[in-house]
Image: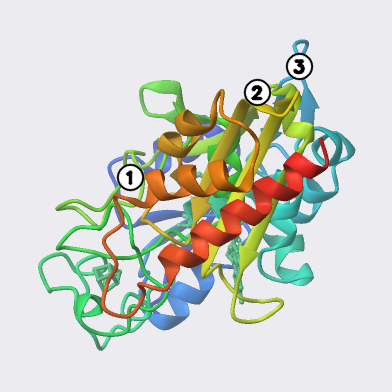
Amino acid sequence: MRPFSYLRAQDAPSAVATATGRPETMYLAGGTNLVDLMRLGVAVPDVLVDVSGIASGTVEETGDGTLLVGAGVRNSDLAADPLVRRRQPLLSQAVLAGASGQIRNMATVGGNLMQRTRCPYFQDVTKPCNKRLPGTGCPARTGENRNLAILGHSDSCVATHPSDMAVALAALGAIVHVEGADGPRTVPMPGLHRLPGEEPERDTVLGQGELITAVEVPPLAFAARSRYRKVRDRASFAFAVVSVAAALDVADGIVRDCRIAFGGVAHTPWRAETAEAVLRGATATEAEFARAAEAELAAARPLPGNAFKIPLVRNVLVRTLTDLAEAS
Ligand SMILES: Cc1cc2nc3c(=O)[nH]c(=O)nc-3n(C[C@H](O)[C@H](O)[C@H](O)COP(=O)(O)OP(=O)(O)OC[C@H]3O[C@@H](n4cnc5c(N)ncnc54)[C@H](O)[C@@H]3O)c2cc1C
Ligand code: SF4
């Protein structure tokens, strides 16, 4: 591992002041992704600014039922929070579907949102990769791409975003609070992460040095009836092959409202707005759920190794919505 300096941040503004304008400076939270990437030689920071001591570690309820989740909240604590479990069970389930108990005890909300792709070429410094070294090419397009994107990819990059939590937050329309050199700002989910386009090295819309300070989860009454379902190669310690986060509001057999997001299919958590629009006002039947899934997936462009993801995510969505409708 390349030698680096370590600084413990005193507060958010001083952390931002230290990192801004210095691309070789990186924030360190739980370290469960960043330290692995440093060991692999994928991340080579000169300076690590440890933000684990300054990021809020609390989940607070504001007056209107919004939950304000500090960027430093550990994944285990978020999943176990009684308000989250009662009001947004899909969020708790998504976090518990990720990593392992030990990793969730270390990993933070901010770090989880900012974790890097698990594309095997990105993690192997002996291989070209446009995300790691812009302009070197994308061997995944014709190589090992079983786990990579079917939606929104570009000639430059076909990677998927790995966070389960982010998929649930995209479905819930969460708002990310950010501190930067020009002060605080907010970024609505799923807009934090970006499609690769011609700049796959940029995973998110955050500028260099911007720090996530909190995530706001707005109230959504029908999110109490919600689910996160993840398909993976092993029962634990495995990233999503595909996943679905869904919340459903059904009255008299008609879908009044719904929220749907997919994981494991794109460079971002994929909010399924086309499927949502098809379902609003439709009967809550398997046939309508399948029609909505197909409308969303009409835009899919599978790679040679991952066409199976199209029927897989469709079937997972139909099963998940059927379960939610039956519980109504
Ligand atoms: C074996 C293994 C299996 C895993 N399986 C899953 C899984 O199935 N699903 C899943 O979702 N995740 C999984 N993970 C990933 C894990 O959830 C992430 O490593 C973790 O959430 C990252 O959080 P952290 O606090 O440790 O971040 P760090 O590793 O400290 O940081 C990650 C990135 O975020 C940046 N960062 C950290 N905090 C901030 C902030 N406040 N503002 C801006 N940038 C910040 C860092 O600079 C770094 O680039 C797995 C990890 C491992 C090792
Ligand atoms: S898919 Fe993206 S991360 Fe993977 S090799 Fe291609 S450019 Fe790199």
- Circle 2 SS class: loop
- Residue at the spot of label 3: 62
* Residue type marked 1: Arg
| Most distant residue in the bottom direction | 126
- Circle 1 SS class: loop
Q: Give the CA separation, mark 2 to mark 1.
A: 22 Å
* Residue type marked 3: Thr
Compared to 150, does 67 lie above or below?
above
- On the rendering, which quadrant does ligand 2 occupy? bottom left
Image marks 1 and 3: residues in contact by CB distance under 8 Å: no
Front position among marks 3 and 2: 2
Disc marking residue 194:
1
Foreground pick, 204 / 256: 256
Foreground pick, 25 / 121: 121
Which badge, 2 or 1, is on the more N-terminal residue?
1
* Disc 3 C-beta below 8 A from ligand 1: no
* Residue type marked 2: Pro
Residue 201 is left or right of residue 274, and the answer is left
Which quadrant is home to the C terminus?
top right
| Residue in view at x 25 percent, y 57 percent | 153
Foreground pick, 179 / 130: 130
Characterize the local packing of mark 2: few (<14), some (14-19) or many (20 or more) Cα atoms within 10 angstroms. Answer: some
Which quadrant is home to the N terminus?
bottom left
* Res. 296 in view: yes
Residue 194, by quadrant, is top left
- Circle 3 SS class: loop
